[in-house]
Image (cartoon, coloured by chain):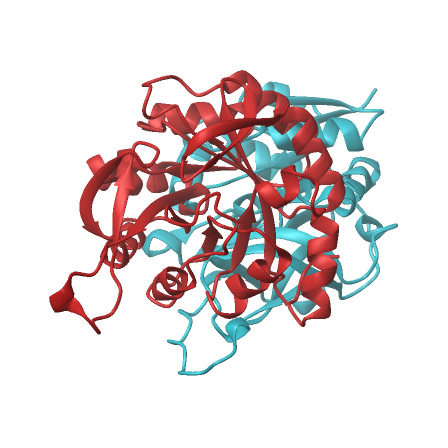
Chain colours: A red, B cyan
Amino acid sequence: MLAKRIIPCLDIDAGRVVKGVKFEDLRDAGDPVEVARRYDQQGADELVFLDITASAQDRAILFKTVEAVAREIYIPLTVGGGVRSCADVRALLSAGADKVSINTAAVLDPDFVTEAGERYGVQCIVAAIDAKRVKPRKKDAGAPPRWQIYTHGGRKSTGLDAIEWARTLVEKGAGELLVTSMDRDGTQEGYDLELLRAIADAVPVPVVASGGVGELEHLYQGFVEGHADAVLAASIFHSGAHTVGEAKRYLAARGIPVRL
Amino acid sequence: METIGIIDYGMGNLHSLQKSLERAAGGSRVLVSYDPETLLACDRLVLPGVGGARACMDELKRLELDRVVREAARRKPLLGVCLGMQVLLEHSDENGGVATLGLIPGQVVRFPDPPPPEPGAPADARLKVPHMGWNRVHQNRPHPLWAGVPDDAWFYFVHSYYAAPRDPAHVLGTADYLRPFAAAIARDNVAGFQFHPEKSQDAGLRLLANFAAWNGEG
């Protein structure tokens, strides 16, 4: 049976691991290589490495850090942030990434996802979706919730509907979706489970839940209520509140198949 | 000193495979090359692969590396990984159908599209394609490549197509996703893993060490 995946996320800014609240107020959380090595040893199933300011500041990805992290770990590594072209994808794969996450560039040109998938294989193309709940107006009372897509590290609204956009990305060839709730990111209040479930049930590819984990219960909810195939978290692991091993034993005890 | 050659036909990330082989096969030199003569001079070869079967076969032919693989298959230990394993078979359904190397009889077919979830179905009933993540591999029979690897160990998979060898004796290991499928295959000195040993921590490194020591029998 395929195990549900637990994925620590390293948000990287200027070569350091950082963690913000709602994509702002960045705080230092350590050296990427040390943090990656620690999670590998704890039994993390994959690592995600997001250069969170690359897109907004028009800055090249920190290839050296990617190389240093990839040298230290023998589990899959996804890298994202500022990926704009097939040359960027190839450079990241060459630096040691196994998968590359695309966000802003896919919104600007959805065919980029297709091109990258055809060239490097859909299994290494992850489409990142940063979604924010649309505040319901009075006349919409009782209507189902809606979410909108944001780009540029959460700074720019696109007007795209999150569920429709998820379907489009899969049609364009994304092999996996990384779904982040901007409302919940860094809040430790738990994933936006409605958003996750709406997307996970709408697409045939794996969905990774992101944004808002504050306790182990939230990981369980991501799988059972959010229908996610993998759960991503940062603060609960970076802060030392829980190890990846503790998270897995907790989930196993509650009946979730995990790799122990 | 023995040399292990990784066949570089320009698709994907060979660095993690190289560093894993270097770590697992401490006594061997590991090189990455697209030069036929350099590769043919190696003691054993690894055919990696990500991407589509058609692009893979096109590039192998363009670089005359299909000849290298066939030549190696006659006398040296040869290991295909992921797509590199799939092209060892005769035909792949990927990209509208592609004739592949034919070193192991059988076909490569796609996982069926998962059925739409039924209301109230448990979370684990929603199976997605690609098959992505860690799954257990059951060892169908003893083989030197399994030495020191526990049965039902976890390995990392990413694929939408799987190999269906015609002769069950060529299946070394089976994983279960939507259906049981061949996760490890071998015919004489030619072997293949559908999973990524270089991404599978200790069990993966052990398999690579076993390949580095394998005499091509079993």
Q: In this view, does A232 lie above or below A63?
A: below
**Residue furthest front in the image:** A138
* Residue B169 spot, x, y in % from top left: 71, 65
Can residue A70 be seen from the camera position used here?
yes
Viewer-proximal residue among B172 and B69: B172
The residue at the point 70 percent across, 48 percent down is A242
Task: Look at the image and tell me in which quarter the N terminus of chain A lies.
Answer: bottom right
The residue at the point 34 percent across, 52 percent down is B95
* Residue A140 spot, x, y in % from top left: 15, 67
- Give left or right: position of B210 versus B131: right
**Residue furthest right in the image:** B148
The residue at the point 44 percent across, 21 percent down is A61
Viewer-proximal residue among A143 and A36: A143
- Give left or right: position of A140 versus A87: left
The residue at the point 50 percent across, 19 percent down is A63
- Give left or right: position of B182 versus A192: right
Task: Look at the image and tell me in which quarter the C terminus of chain A lies.
Answer: bottom right
* Residue A125 spot, x, y in % from top left: 41, 42
- Give left or right: position of B61 versus A219: left
Q: In this view, does B28 lie above or below A119?
A: above
